[in-house]
Amino acid sequence: MSKQHKRHKKTSLAATADRHELYELSVQCAEAEIDFVDAAYKRIRGRKARLLREDFCGTANVCCEWVRRGGKRRAVGVDLDGEVLAWGRDNNVARLGKKQRERITLLQHDVLEVRTEAPDIILAMNFSYWLLEQRPLLLKYFRSVHEALGDEGVFFLDAYGGYDSFREIEEPRQIDDGGDGFTYVWEQASFNPIDHHVVCYIHFGFPDGSELRKAFTYEWRLWTLPEVRDLLTEAGFRRVTVYWQGWDKHGEPDGDFNPATRADADAGWICYVSAEK
């Protein structure tokens, strides 16, 4: 009697991948983000910040990095997505020490309505505030941030632009994760020049040829820097500063952001913005 052999299909890397872990490896650098806001706040206010609130906090990676930097630092993370907050608790907050965990509060709440203790810093990074596509809605959010901040509070946010941001484009980038690596792909799938509505996807590709398509989907408005600056001023912030990234000797972004009032018309750029109460 001949033996029957069952063929077992090998599980692909995409099937076992964790999209949140991939995102943190390829998109978000919490250490660099905290380096920037920490130094910028001290330069603006002449002292160290203690309480940070991260709006649209996602996995709360930045909140965790903040409390690691000092025993007197506290963080509040706010996000509407319960699933991503749960992932952050299980995978980021859980890795902290007991006393560090006690200095983090995660809230599943609408950033437009949330009420918290007045922080020194409020963050809205990774272009998260672009989800608010109507001008009155974004102005309402900026006003709520202004009201929520302490007397010496500073609001930090980021933006991207450049002439490539107005077209449909795919940008792959190889990521070294300490193993075989993977490919991160940013796709701007559609752009409407009339209202600046954008649909974007993040895809991931793996060495075995498998793919995780549309791991993340974003529909938002491509806000321009003049619009953002004007809305922040209208919301009551007394000084708005743009921080532009420099270039190294190879013509690559150097990760060093400095205050600027003029910049080159590049194909693509990312900047930080601070708004002082």
Image (cartoon, rainbow, N blue to C red):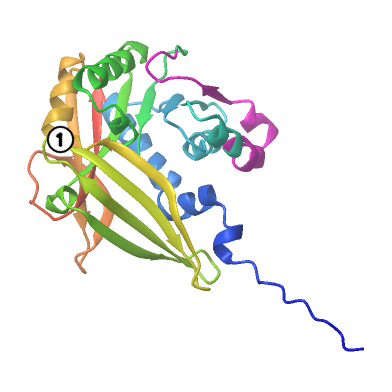
Left/right placement of residue 258 relative to residue 54 reads left
Taking 29 as reference, is 179 above or below it? Answer: below
Q: Is residue 71 above or below residue 200?
A: above
Q: Position of residue 141 (x, y in %)?
A: 30, 18
Which quadrant is the N terminus positioned in?
bottom right
Residue under label 1: 225
* Residue at the extreme front of the image, as rendered: 1
Residue 88, horizontal then vertical, whole percent: 57, 38
Asked if residue 53 is positioned above or below residue 225 in the image, the reply reads above
At a point 67% along the width and 37% down the height, the residue shown is: 97
186 relative position to 79: left or right = left
Q: Amino acid at mark 1?
A: Leu
How many numbered badges does the structure rendering display?
1
Q: Is residue 112 magenta?
A: yes
| Of residues 137 and 238, the one drawn nearer to the viewer in this rendering | 137
Looking at the rendering, the stretch of residues picked out in magenta corresponds to 88-114
Q: Residue at x 18, y 49 (%)?
A: 165
Residue 173: x, y in percent? 35, 64
Q: What element does badge 1 sit on?
A: helix
Q: Is residue 125 magenta?
A: no
Q: Callout 1: 10 Å neighbours few (<14), some, many (20+)?
A: some
Figure quadrant of residue 152: top left
| Location of residue 186 in the rendering, given as x and y in whole percent from the top left corner | 33, 55
| Residue 38, picture quadrant | top left
Outermost residue toward the bottom in this view: 1
Front residue of 103/210: it is 210
Residue at 11% in and 32% down: 226
